[in-house]
Image (cartoon, rainbow, N blue to C red):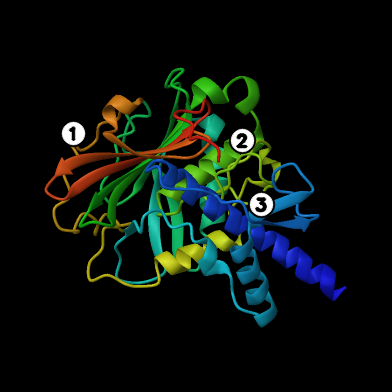
Amino acid sequence: MLASFVHGRLCRHVKRLYGALDRFAGRQADLGGYDQGHQHLALPGCRILGDDMHKLNRRAAVMIAAALIAGAPLIAGASHSWGGYHWARTANPFTLELGDNVDNSWDGYLLTTSTDWSTSAVLNTTIKPGATSSRTCKPTTGRVEVCNNSYGNTGWLGVAGISITGGKHITAAYVKLNDSYFRSGTYNTVAWRNLVMCQEVGHTFGLDHQDENFGNANLDTCMDYTNSPSSNQHPNQHDFDELETIYGHLDSFTTVISSDGGGGGSGGGSCNPKSRKCNPGSNDPSGWGRLVSTSRDGHRQVFELDLGNGNKMITHVFWAEPRGRQPQH
């Protein structure tokens, strides 16, 4: 019975570590500097790549096993912070507004996402009337605007954009959900809508993915890429643990707007929210700046637009149709 318990824990953490290694592989492949090597350890019964055996670097696997035996926590080994980006605030928990620019077909999903993420010990979300048009979805200083529209056959399901000032502080954010895909075919399901809504909003908090391999077994979180989203519709405990890590410090100022309209925008030089350059509102890479990274399977890309004076717009794209696949090793 003890062996079964240890195997279950080991399998779960192996999946998480594999996801972290897989993301690292994709990013290093951009630089031509990654080689998975040839020494592997098979873990029977741990279904990850459609096999009954999961291959993982031997040294990493031995370290996991040793940590489990010693009772050490493994959360830090699978960090999925998105570049250290975070909202500045002077206290926890803080409340982040989600601007409702979605139509009736998405209202329930926005409510589910808001409720789910508000389970966090460090942040709450509250839904407020939208302050932009769903077509342009320009971000508003101090909060997240959430939009849906038929943005065309762009190739992407969802986009999350964050405005950055001072290196790591988020000053505004937006989410776009592309009804050109969600209103017909594969993605017109409750599970896909929950996953993409939950995931794109999660990015605006500073979270990245736990795993970016669509063929791996589900991690039961919306921050996990998958071909079958039935169990990946909501955050899991690892997401909440990561948020506590990201927001484990306090700042001397806030970039979050308060519910009474105060606060926000005090991060030291965010760009004018009425400027077209500050809020490009683009639906294709031509308006997102330079390509920063691509996942190995091409479903995730990140772009960076330099706005000057230390301000940037970072765009996280969830492609339905993979772009720029990385070579498999």
- At label 1, the amino acid type is Lys
Q: Where residue 245 is drawn, which disc sits there?
A: none
- At label 3, the amino acid type is Asp
**What residue is rendered at 36% in x and 55% in y?**
83
**What residue is rendered at 50% in x and 24% in y?**
179
Q: Where residue 220 is drawn, which disc sits there?
A: 3
Q: Position of residue 89 (x, y in %)?
A: 30, 66
- At label 2, the amino acid type is Trp
What residue would you read off at disc 2?
Answer: 192
Mark 1 packing: few (<14 Cα in 10 Å), some, or many (20+)?
A: some
Q: Where residue 277 is drawn, which disc sits there?
A: 1
Please name whichever residue, 116 or 161, is drawn nearer the observer in this view of the structure. Answer: 161
Q: Quadrant of the N terminus?
A: bottom right
Q: Are marks 1 and 2 in contact (CB under 8 Å)?
A: no
Where disc 2 sits, the SS reads helix
Mark 3 packing: few (<14 Cα in 10 Å), some, or many (20+)?
A: some
145 relative position to 272: left or right: right
Is residue 210 among what the camera can see?
no
Residue 11, quarter of the rendered image: bottom right
